[in-house]
Image (tube, grey):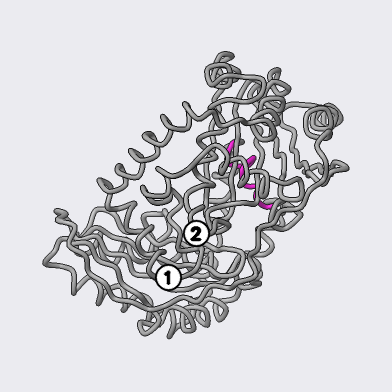
Amino acid sequence: MYQYHTLKNGIKIVFRRNNSTVIHSGVYINIGSRDERGSDEGKAHFIEHSVFKGTEHRRPYHILNRIDGVGGELNAFTTKEETCIYASSLAIHLERCLELFADIIFHSTFPEKEIEKEKDVVLEEINSYKDSPAELIYDDFEQYIFEGHPLAHNILGTPRNVRRFTSQGLRAFMQDNYTTDRMVVSIVGNADFRRVVRLCEKYFGEYPQRESAADRTREPECRKFDITLNRRTHQMHILIGCQAVNIFDERKVAFSLLNNVIGGPAMNSRLNVAIREKYGFCYTIESQFTPFSDTGLFYIYAGIEPEACERYIELVHRQLCQLAERPLSESQLRAAKQQYIGQMAINNESALNEMQAIGKSYLVFDRVDTLEEMQRDIDGVEAEDIRALAAELLAPDNLSYLIYR
């Protein structure tokens, strides 16, 4: 189903063919905000913005027009551990996309005039989060729980750091970290794989093999906290969370299933039924599991009526304790597995989602599991696996709390 190739310089390629007229392509780089040090905080994200601002061969308009001008879409994002530059276009424009990726990754010049303008853009992005407490609270939570570790870095950086970025500093960070050993080209669309390889060799193969200076050997230590901040919001925004398993932990599949049962996207999640449907305390309630390379985080978020705060926390504790004390019944486990598998299959129907998923998987694990293989892993989860994880990690004594009021 998936086809792979590695260029002589170490850049890897993963591809799946379909019959669509649209092709999705991207380059994943295993560098994110956790790889920043000191005054570099925010630099990975700023570079993701600034690679579109000029190369040795193109001015900003020519970069933006290269894909958008033929009806495609060019975009990028940064996480704690990855950067991705990607595009969606008609399949006939794949070469155009790959050539542009190589140009902006290996030939960006970061013109000072453009960098100064982009600082204002990023500063406004930082300010926009201050107006979105439901998003800001996740960043604040991670800063508290990972205090003193690079994972605590806000992906956007700090206003002070952003204002001090220079073209020279951006080029140095990119030179040190955007290296061939940390890159994967991911493509899903209607193309011949031999042509895909030829195009990647043409546009990516000429660059010398280099290894990144990034060091992730320092493991994070999660601390507990209970903090309430006065944000003058109409709702109380509450984030309850704790450390979870990392992306390589063999229990990751079981924890993913546990998270989906607790507060996944379905309306029949335990939290949605027990709190929103039964009491009407909130409009949004959800849980999330974010695994990193050496740790993980589990969160429960809700926007709550202020007078319902204490009762809400009691109800959350009750749901978590029930999962820790009593294994799911056979019918409950079977239903949970069917639901999770169905959600994954629907998500994979989006070729863009699939391109991003297989790119990250090949970057991190050096392989991509098929939907059938993922289903087999889910089917292998036992009720006791889920109960044991809930008991070990989700006990009330392990939880931290961040409240905006």
Image quarter where the C terminus lies is: bottom left
Image quarter where the N terminus lies is: top right
Q: Is any atom of residue 216 visible in this view?
A: yes
What residue is at 25 percent from the left and 45 percent from the top?
131
Q: Is residue 150 above or below residue 92?
A: below
> Looking at the rendering, which quadrant does residue 379 occupy?
bottom right
Please say whether residue 353 is one of the residues in the magenta stretch. Answer: yes
Task: Kindly identify the amino acid type of the residue bearing the numbered disc 2.
Answer: Gly
The residue beneath circle 2 is 38
What residue is at 11 percent from the left and 67 percent from the top?
307
Q: Which mark is residue 365?
A: none
Q: Is residue 5 above or below residue 61?
A: below
Mark 2 or mark 1: name the one nearer the start of the chain: 2
Question: Is 403 on the left-hand or right-hand side of 113?
Answer: left
Q: Residues within 10 Å of mark 1 (few under 14, many from 20)?
A: some
What span is in magenta?
352-361
Q: Residue furthest left?
A: 307
Mark 1 secondary-structure assignment? loop
Q: Mark 2 or mark 1, which is nearer to you?
A: 2
What residue is at 43 percent from the left and 32 percent from the top?
116
Task: Kindly identify the amino acid type of the residue bearing the numbered disc 1.
Answer: Glu
What residue is at 71 percent from the left and 50 percent from the top?
182
Please say whether residue 312 is one of the residues in the magenta stretch. Answer: no
Q: Which mark is residue 147?
A: 1
Q: Position of residue 89 (x, y in %)?
A: 61, 23
Q: Is any atom of residue 359 visible in this view?
A: no
Q: Residues within 10 Å of mark 2 (few under 14, many from 20)?
A: few
Question: Is 380 on the left-hand or right-hand side of 332?
Answer: right
Mark 2 secondary-structure assignment? helix
